[in-house]
Amino acid sequence: MIFEKIMNSLEDTERFAIKLANLLMAQDTITLEGDLGAGKTTFTKALAKGLGVTRTVNSPTFTIVKQYEGRLPFNHLDVYRLAESDEDLGWDELFYGDAVSVVEWAHLIEQDLPKERLGIEIYRIGENERRFVLMPYGKRYEALCEELMR
């Protein structure tokens, strides 16, 4: 099952991310795909805000993982630089601990991702308009998407 939603503004994206954040639990994993500038980091910042993260969230491009405290611990991963690597960076500790994890460029570590997760692809359709395609892997994420789309 695939879900789609059009965001007509940055505010729509922020509201959507905050609504999702309110439904998340420990060990939830969200994978993000989209071209450069599609809005992956913008979405992640809003999600972190919804999780109660008060620190500034920015792309962890040079560190791969940044961790934040909020209602739930929050892991923000940008694995773009791992394209040519098969290094295990302790994925199990990240994905199966007590945090919510968001992974940008997740296809690069597909084999290390939890089988059950929420995949989100973001497509730029205008200056501030985006099309979000949500692909739930597992019953929990299907139910989460159904709730999110209400």
Image (cartoon, rainbow, N blue to C red):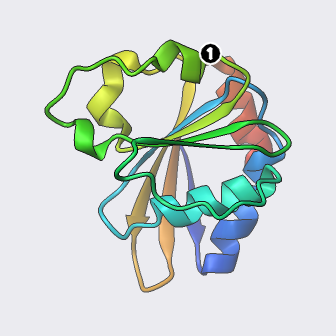
In this rendering, the answer to whether 76 lies above or below 34 is above
Residue 113 lies in quadrant:
top left
Amino acid type shown at disc 1: Tyr
Q: Position of residue 52 (x, y in %)?
A: 83, 53
Which secondary structure, mark 1?
loop
In this picture, residue 147 sits left or right of residue 118: right
In this rendering, the answer to whether 18 lies above or below 116 is below
Q: Depth check: 134 or 46 in front? A: 46
In this picture, residue 5 sits left or right of residue 20: left
Q: Is residue 5 visible?
A: no
In this picture, residue 118 sits left or right of residue 82: right
Residue under the point 86% across and 42% down = 71
Residue under the point 62% across and 15% down = 96
Residue under the point 80% across and 42% down = 147
Q: Position of residue 138 (x, y in %)?
A: 60, 19
Q: Is residue 49 visible?
A: yes
| The N terminus: image quadrant | top right
- Pointer 1 residue: 96
Q: Position of residue 83 (x, y in %)?
A: 19, 37
Residue under the point 48% across and 64% down = 131
Q: Position of residue 9 (x, y in %)?
A: 60, 81
Residue farthest to the bottom? 127
Callout 1 crowding tier (Cα within 10 Å): few <14, some 14–19, many ≥20: some
In this picture, residue 81 sits left or right of residue 127: left
Q: Depth check: 83 or 127 in front? A: 83
